[in-house]
Image: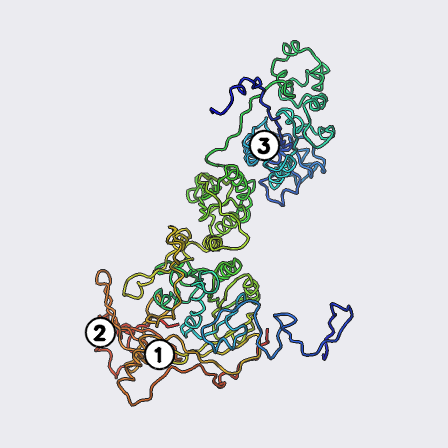
């Protein structure tokens, strides 16, 4: 700019290093991941029993109930069964554990964009950029814990200025006793604390743990005391790099977790699901993960495909379909877990299961990224319409789409075709009720018309689906044994030459109990003798079809 | 009780108050046995001043069930409630809302509804017993489904007015549940049932029995209301049918010596013999 004096440019100080915000890392460690990734799919009554995860024929992990019975890690299967007869055994599955860890990572992505996985059971978050938005580090930690806790996973959380340091503190059970306060330790404090950390917490040292112990090295501090060249020559650079990265002496590269565009997850049910409740229990777990992914992507779910994989009764079972596909479509995109659960429940109750279900798969690729409607304190017209939309959706989920209808007046003179019933499509209906252009919005909508007195009725309110044939008594049509008194003269409706010609004379008649009915006389000869020939005074109770009189509606 | 002792706010000791304290002064929902009760919120005017005068609150009650008992569908029940429903659908009673019909006995005719003041886009019909035209029988709903749908609509509070035709055999607690759910609903709820239900007790605070009387007249007998029992029946003139009206006028002109037929005023006619078998309803 020309106004800046040239002397200011000369007196500018040399380049200062830009102040870098110190990194804050949170590590979420799942100590019982193999066992809990399996037990989360069990029904609640089974989760209270002793559970053990087997690797081959040996026990690998046990829950508290099994420990109380005496089952320990490393026992053989027969021993464990002898100690706890109702022990439920499961097999470890690496894919299942990886999926659970990924689900936790997606939940963590709501709080910060920098999330990485550290070995098999730890999720790392870098929150220096977002902790202020979330209300400070303690508030962020509380929210993180509360978003993971409904999943039934036990977690241990630690914070540190470096990633590996946080991961170490989280996986070391005694770290919490050594930390002086709740706040994040500084680099110096971290160095002091990690000096006492056992070496088997480091991935590189775990493989050579026995040899390290033989040499008398059991903590990280021992390693740090040794000369570096000797260490690297003896154990390789990897161990040294890990120890350096603990306190930030060495920069680290992380593989950040990125959100996929399409969410897919599967859950193998460890019991055969025969009824809705059991399928719903498993499906809810999958829905929780879907909602975590949708929230991390800042979108709202519109359609979800749920596939129920059936168990074949025998190997060449051709009658049972391999899978049932349920498509859940929301008229209003949502990431509200409760609403989706209600819809899924009603949908599942209406779906017959041809065979028992042993696996559930969920897939979703349809997210909507627009602004959600904001919650308001006082109901406005828009929120009332949203509420009605949700009500219609709920009814249609349980009763079926064809049960909830709207009427449509058709320009046809034939009364049975003048009204059409169409299944209500909530989105179209809403669009019809709220005009789009702003100018049209200022005028009253079609539903708000000026008050008029009701017009005189020309049509009955209730129309019978099939016209009821009326017997004739003494040349007058009769209903329930009593003759009808014709009040208003014939209205001839003759229409439909293109598909179904109807020529009828309509009358308004009064029945025995003084109610009004709408009857007609068909003019064209029907099957049987001519109407004029059959309708004589001498022959009471003519065959119905020959008389030509029909009841079509009632005036209500 | 001749005198009520109420604490005086200023002096701090009990002062006798005169005996003529009105129940309404203590709480707006209190009423004496010989008065008509008043409703906590504004009632929907029925359209007939004679009926308004006999109903507590001066109209159809909101947030409560109203039972209309008829012998068979087609005595004039829809014309009776059409004035109130069209006012709700048009938005005169608050926001313009939708009107829901649950399990109607036959197909409603869109033209007729339009003529009564209910345009087709404000109606939602939940079909129960008869599926839409041409649908197979598998679309018929069970009684539990219809009751569930009705309860959901009442609880949500987003529908403007509800007309429901209930299944014949109901469990005794089903109506009680609907009455509780109706308290969340902002508009009138009409349950249409058969005339034989008048012998059975019901938690609905307002019960009317309807009978057709001639082409344009509906006889209304109030079986139960929050107030003294009404001994007489009301005859209300309904919106006439155009064809019948024209025919009458034509007949009148063609025979001028007959006295002019005028639409009768609503009258309170004395009880007829078939009213005497009515059991005394316990007031709500």
Disc with the residue nearer the chain's start (3 vs 2): 3
* Element type where label 2 sits in the image: loop
Dividing the picture into quarters, in which one does residue A526 lie? bottom left
Residue position for label 3? A92
* Element type where label 3 sits in the image: loop
Q: Residues within 10 Å of mark 1 (few under 14, many from 20)?
A: many
> Please, which chain is the residue tagged with disc 3 on?
A
Residue position for label 2? A529
Residue position for label 1? A510
> Residue A122's spot in the image, x, y percent?
61, 29
* Element type where label 1 sits in the image: strand
Query: Is residue A324 visible in the rendered structure shown here?
Result: no
> Residue B62's spot in the image, x, y percent?
52, 66
Disc with the residue nearer the chain's start (3 vs 1): 3
| Relative to A105, residue A514 above or below | below
Query: Is residue A116 visible in the rendered structure shown here?
Result: yes
> Residue A65's spot in the image, x, y percent?
69, 39
Dividing the picture into quarters, in which one does residue B108 lie? bottom left
C-alpha span from label 3 to label 2: 82 Å
C-alpha span from label 2 to label 1: 28 Å
Pointers 3 and 1 within a single chain: yes
> Residue A94's spot in the image, x, y percent?
56, 30
Q: Observer-nearest residue: A97 or A332? A: A332
Q: Residues within 10 Å of mark 3 (few under 14, many from 20)?
A: some
Q: Residues within 10 Å of mark 2 (few under 14, many from 20)?
A: some
């Amino acid at each position: 700019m020309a106004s800046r004096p040239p002397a200011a440019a000369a007196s500018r100080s040399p380049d200062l290093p830009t102040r870098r915000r110190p990194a804050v890392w949170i590590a979420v460690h799942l100590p019982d991941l193999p066992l809990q990734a399996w037990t989360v799919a069990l029904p609640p009554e089974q989760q209270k029993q002793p559970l053990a995860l087997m690797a081959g024929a040996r026990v690998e992990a046990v829950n508290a109930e099994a420990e109380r019975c005496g089952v320990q890690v490393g026992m053989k299967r027969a021993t464990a069964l002898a100690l706890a007869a109702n022990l439920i055994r499961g097999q470890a599955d690496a894919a299942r554990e990886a999926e659970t860890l990924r689900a936790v990572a997606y939940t963590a992505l709501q709080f910060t964009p920098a999330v990485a996985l550290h070995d098999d059971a730890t999720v790392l978050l870098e929150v220096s950029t977002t902790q202020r938005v979330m209300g400070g580090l303690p508030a962020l930690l509380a929210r993180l814990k509360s978003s993971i806790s409904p999943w039934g996973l036990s977690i241990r959380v630690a914070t540190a200025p470096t990633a590996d340091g946080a991961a170490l503190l989280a996986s070391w059970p005694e770290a919490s006793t050594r930390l002086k306060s709740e706040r994040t330790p500084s680099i110096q404090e971290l160095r002091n604390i990690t000096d006492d950390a056992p070496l088997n917490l480091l991935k590189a040292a775990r493989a050579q743990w026995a040899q390290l112990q033989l040499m008398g090295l059991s903590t990280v501090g021992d390693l740090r005391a040794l000369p570096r060249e000797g260490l690297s020559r003896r154990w390789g650079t990897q161990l040294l790099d890990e120890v350096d990265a603990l306190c930030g002496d060495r920069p680290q590269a992380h593989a950040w977790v990125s959100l996929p565009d399409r969410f897919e997850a599967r859950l193998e049910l460890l019991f055969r699901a025969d009824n809705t409740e059991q399928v719903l229990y498993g499906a809810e777990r999958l829905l929780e993960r879907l909602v975590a992914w949708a929230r991390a992507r800042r979108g709202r779910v519109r359609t979800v495909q749920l596939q129920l994989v059936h168990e074949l009764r025998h190997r060449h079972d051709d009658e049972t379909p391999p899978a049932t596909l349920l498509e859940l479509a929301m008229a209003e995109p949502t990431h509200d877990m409760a609403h989706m659960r209600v819809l899924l429940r009603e949908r599942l109750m209406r779906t017959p299961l041809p065979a028992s279900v042993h696996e559930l798969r969920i897939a979703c690729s349809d997210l909507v990224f627009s602004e959600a409607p904001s919650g308001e304190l006082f109901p406005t017209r828009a929120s009332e319409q949203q509420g009605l939309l949700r009500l219609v959706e709920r009814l249609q989920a349980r009763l079926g789409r064809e049960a909830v209808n709207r009427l449509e007046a058709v320009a046809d003179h034939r009364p049975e075709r003048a009204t059409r019933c169409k299944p209500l499509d909530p989105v179209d209906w809403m669009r019809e009720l709220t005009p789009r252009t702003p100018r049209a919005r200022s005028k009253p909508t079609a539903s708000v018309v000026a008050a008029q007195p009701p017009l005189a009725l020309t049509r009955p309110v209730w129309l019978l689906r099939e016209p009821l044939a009326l017997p004739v008594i003494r040349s007058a049509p009769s209903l329930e044994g009593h003759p009808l008194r014709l009040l208003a003269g014939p209205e001839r409706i003759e229409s439909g030459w293109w598909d179904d010609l109807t020529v009828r004379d309509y009358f308004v008649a009064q029945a025995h109990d003084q109610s009004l009915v709408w009857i007609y006389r068909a003019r064209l000869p029907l099957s049987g003798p001519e109407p004029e020939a059959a309708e004589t005074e001498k022959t009471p109770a003519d065959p119905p079809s020959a008389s030509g009189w029909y009841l079509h509606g009632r005036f209500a | 009780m001749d005198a009520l002792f109420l604490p005086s706010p200023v002096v701090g000791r009990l002062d006798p108050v005169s005996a003529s304290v009105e129940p309404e002064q203590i709480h707006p929902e209190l009423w004496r046995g010989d008065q008509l009760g008043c409703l906590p919120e504004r009632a929907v005017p029925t359209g007939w001043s004679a009926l308004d005068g006999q109903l507590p609150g001066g109209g159809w009650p909101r947030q409560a069930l109203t039972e209309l008992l008829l012998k068979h569908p087609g005595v004039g029940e829809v014309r009776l409630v059409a004035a109130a429903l069209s006012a709700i659908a048009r938005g005169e009673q608050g926001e313009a809302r939708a009107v829901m019909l649950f399990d109607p006995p036959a197909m409603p005719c869109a033209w007729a509804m339009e003529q009564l003041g209910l345009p087709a886009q404000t109606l939602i019909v939940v079909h129960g017993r008869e599926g839409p035209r041409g649908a197979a029988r598998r679309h018929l709903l069970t009684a539990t489904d219809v009751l569930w749908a009705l309860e959901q609509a009442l609880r949500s509070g987003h529908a403007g007015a509800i007309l429901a035709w209930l299944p014949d055999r109901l469990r005794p607690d089903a109506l009680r549940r609907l009455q509780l759910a109706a308290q969340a609903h902002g508009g009138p709820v009409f349950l249409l049932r058969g005339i034989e239900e008048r012998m059975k007790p019901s938690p609905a605070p307002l019960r009317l029995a309807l009978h057709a009387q001639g082409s344009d007249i509906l006889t209304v007998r109030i079986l139960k209301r929050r107030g003294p029992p009404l001994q007489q029946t009301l005859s209300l003139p309904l919106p006439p049918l155009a064809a019948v009206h024209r025919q009458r006028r034509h007949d009148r002109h063609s025979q001028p010596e007959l006295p002019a037929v005028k639409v009768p005023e609503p009258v309170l006619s004395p009880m007829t013999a078939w009213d005497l078998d009515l059991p005394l309803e316990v007031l709500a």
